[in-house]
Every structure is written in C-alpha cells, then in structure tokens.
Amino acid sequence: MKPNNPRLLAVQTLTRVVGKGGYSNLTLDHAITKYRLDSRDAGLLTNIVYGVIQHQLTLDYLLKPFVKKRQLDPWIRCLLQTAVYQLQYLDKLPARAVFYDSTEIAKQLGHQGIAKFVTGVLREAQRTGFPEPESIRDPIERLAITSSTPIWLVKKLREQLGVTKTASILAAINQPAHASIRVNTTKTTPDALLKTLKPKFPELRESSLTPIGLIAPGGHLAGTPEFAAGDYTMQDESSMLVAPSLDIQPGDAVLDACAAPGGKTTHIAQYLDSDQGGRVTALDLHANKIRLIKQNANRLGLADRVSAQMLDARQTDTTFAPESFDKILVDAPCSGLGLIRRKPEIKYTKQADDPLHLQQIQLAILNSVAPTLKIGGRLTYSTCTMVKEENQDVVAHFLAAHPEFEQVPVLTLKPLTKTHGAPALQLFPDDYDTDGFFIASMIRRK
C-alpha cells in the first residue's frame, strides 16, 4: 500500500491524535502537505479523521460485541473505528474497498494475524449487524452514545440547559464546521473581498452574525494571495463579536490580556488609529505565541498599533500603572467546550472538574486587570465554552468582589435574536451554526 493512501494516513493520523495527544487540525494539515494529497484524497482523509473523532464513543459501542474484552493497541482500535465509520456514515463508499484497505493496513502496520482479526471483526459485523444505540434504556447513556459525548458533560448540560436544548446542541456539534473569515477593513471591504473570492469559492456568503465576516461550507481559504496579502484572516464568526463589544475608539489604549494567537488582538487593532495614539497591548505567557501575534499583525498590516509582550496576565496589576487602559479584553483560558465541532477531541480530553479549576485562573486574571482600567472604561470577559462555572458564575463572583464595576449589555454590530443570558451574550453551537461562545461586558464606575 502506498504511503499516501488516505485510509492508511487516517489510521496513522488518528493514532497520533488519540494515542499521543496531538491536535487533529495540525496533524491532519501536516499529512496533507507532506504527501501532497489531491483534493479528493485530502477530502476523504479529512472526513474520516474528523468523523472518527466526532463519533468515537458511538463507534466503540458498535464495535464492542465483536471486539469483546480483547485489549487493542491504539492503532488497531483506530483502524477498526475508521472501517466502521466508513461503513456506517459514508454511504457512497463500496464496502469491499473498505474491507480490502483495512486488511492491507493491518498487514502493513502489524502482521497477518492482526489482518485476520480485523477481517473477522468486520465480516461478523456485516453478517449480524451492528447494535442499535437507540435501544439503550438509560436516557443519559443513550444520548451520550448517540452523540458521542462523555456522560459527565451530558449530565452537566442537561442540568444547566434542560433536555431539549442539550439534545439540540449535541446534534449540532457533530455537523461539519464551516470555514469563516474576518475581513481586514483597513485594507478592503466585505463586498469587495466577496466579489474577489467568489470565483474561487462560489458558496462564500455573508455571515448572519457580523457584517465583517464571510463564511463557506469548506475550502482552503488560508491558501489564497488575498490571505497572504492580509486582506483577511481566519476566525470563527462568534469570536468576531468580541472586539465590537469593547466600543473601541481610534485613540484608545487597549489591553488584550490573553491574546495568542492574535485573532482578537488584530480585530481590536482594526478599530485603532496609531496617529491618534491608539494601541493594543497583547499579553501571553509564551515567547513562541508572542511571535505568532506579531506575525499575524505584520501580515495584516497592523503592526504599528500592536505591542506584544510576554507576561502572565495575573501579573497585570503589578506591571502596569493603575488606570492605564481605556478598554480591556480578558478572553480567558477555558475548557474550550464551545469548540467541540471544530476540535472534537476536546470532548475526550476534558474532565468534569476542569471548569471549576479554570474558574480560579479566570477570576485571578480579572482581579489583576481590574485596577488598570480607567474609570468609565469597559472590560469584556469572554470564553469559548458553554458551562456556567466558567461564564455566568465567574462574572457573578467578580462583580461581588468589585462593586466599582457594573455589568452592561453586550454591544453587537447586528441585532441578534438567538442569544442567551442577557445582559451577557451566550451563543451555543445550534444557535447560528458557530462555535459556542460567551461574552460579558462591564463598565468601571468608580
């Protein structure tokens, strides 16, 4: 079997992601680039990798009667998962191709005995049929298996959002995420960019959330001359709501306390005018991420209004003078549960107590930045997660400890009808087919 076979690459990619903790998007991009896959093979590889990760618990449930209690090496489990995913979810692929390639992969990565085992599992499943997850009696376990979501997360969402909303969210996160771009309004306009890119990406259209966003079902939007020239950058629609919430004026001094890789930093910078003294100070803990922020600012032509600095945001109050900033953004480290559709491995790497542990870090950052905001200044707190412990509860704790702050409605460029938790703004993946996101805005009154 050739090393660029997409089914072989899918098994190898999944083994790195599941067994060694790699990031699915980076590992996948590396494989596509290294083996110079054409669009058809790259599409199949991408479909299998993301499909298996998204449906991992479902696939394991389907395999259980045939694998029984046998302990499997990670790559063998990944191989069987890819085969079952193709048989169950990809109708246009002939079963004989899946069986043949799976057997050959088993021989190539293992030996003849493993190949016989893999073939035996698939043949028995073909003869007897797979078990039906809908027949599971316990409603929480049934939803966990059918949506491939850990039971702890199903329980938490049900407790906080109810049965109907939880089921809707879990159905949405297993749908493909579309590609979205943010227009660099210092270089072009949404209409002009849409006209330029439309011939290459016919399905590209305006975002329903923001007037500076464009979306498409797919496509390599980061591979165009316009991207290289800085006419736009890749960013999910929901996170494009953050910078407008700050009500930035051209001459503002803005702090982006948790900035890497710089998407929101550069969005903030689009509102600033360096000639009027406008500047955003971007903080991050790691030198390599500071370099990434600077690279993004340079590509977008915004470096004259971006200052990137390596610093733990929890040291803001001991590094900057009181009332240094007109606006502050704390896009806090979080569990990332709102990103599950785009990064499905998050479902399996997080634990039930992570939100409460992260809450302590989130509050520490807010407490540290608070004194550095000017009276009358605006503080935005945001996360890409969906649970109250990291969102509403953090805001409530902060306001209780800081009576000088008042929560105010979140400003948006478009009126939004499918939001939750006013005056904060909570989006779930099923609301607008975006990442799940939370934004809260506060004014310092004294």
Image (spheres, rainbow, N blue to C red):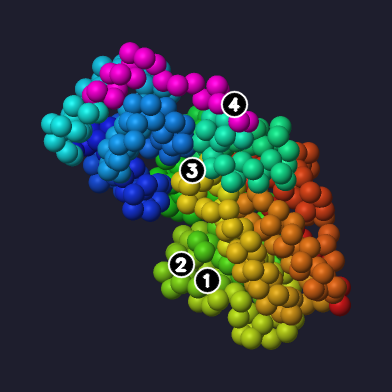
Q: Earlier in the sequence, mark 1 or mark 2?
A: 1
Compared with 406, 7 (above or below) is above
Asked if one can make out residue 402 in the rendered structure from this viewpoint, the answer is: yes
Q: Position of residue 149 (x, y in %)?
A: 54, 39
Q: Which amino acid type is marked by label 1?
A: Asp
Q: Which amino acid type is marked by label 3?
A: Pro
Q: Are marks 4 and 3 in contact (CB under 8 Å)?
A: no
Residue name at image x 49 percent, y 21 percent: 132
| Left or right, 122 with reference to 174 | left
Asked if one can make out residue 243 in the rendered structure from this viewpoint, the answer is: no
Q: Which residue is mark 1?
A: 284
Q: Which residue is mark 4?
A: 137
Q: Quadrant of residue 312?
A: bottom right
Compared with 427, 391 (above or below) is below
Measured in 3D between alpha carbons, the distance from the residue under mark 4 to the one under mark 3, in whole angstroms, is 26 Å
Q: Earlier in the sequence, mark 4 or mark 3?
A: 4
Q: Which residue is mark 2?
A: 289
> Helix, strand or loop at disc 1?
strand
| Nearer mark to the viewer, of 4 and 3 | 4
The residues colored magenta run 119-139
| Left or right, 66 with reference to 110 | right
Measured in 3D between alpha carbons, the distance from the residue under mark 3 to the one under mark 1, in whole angstroms, is 25 Å
Compared with 321, 167 (above or below) is above
Q: Earlier in the sequence, mark 4 or mark 2?
A: 4
> Helix, strand or loop at disc 2?
helix
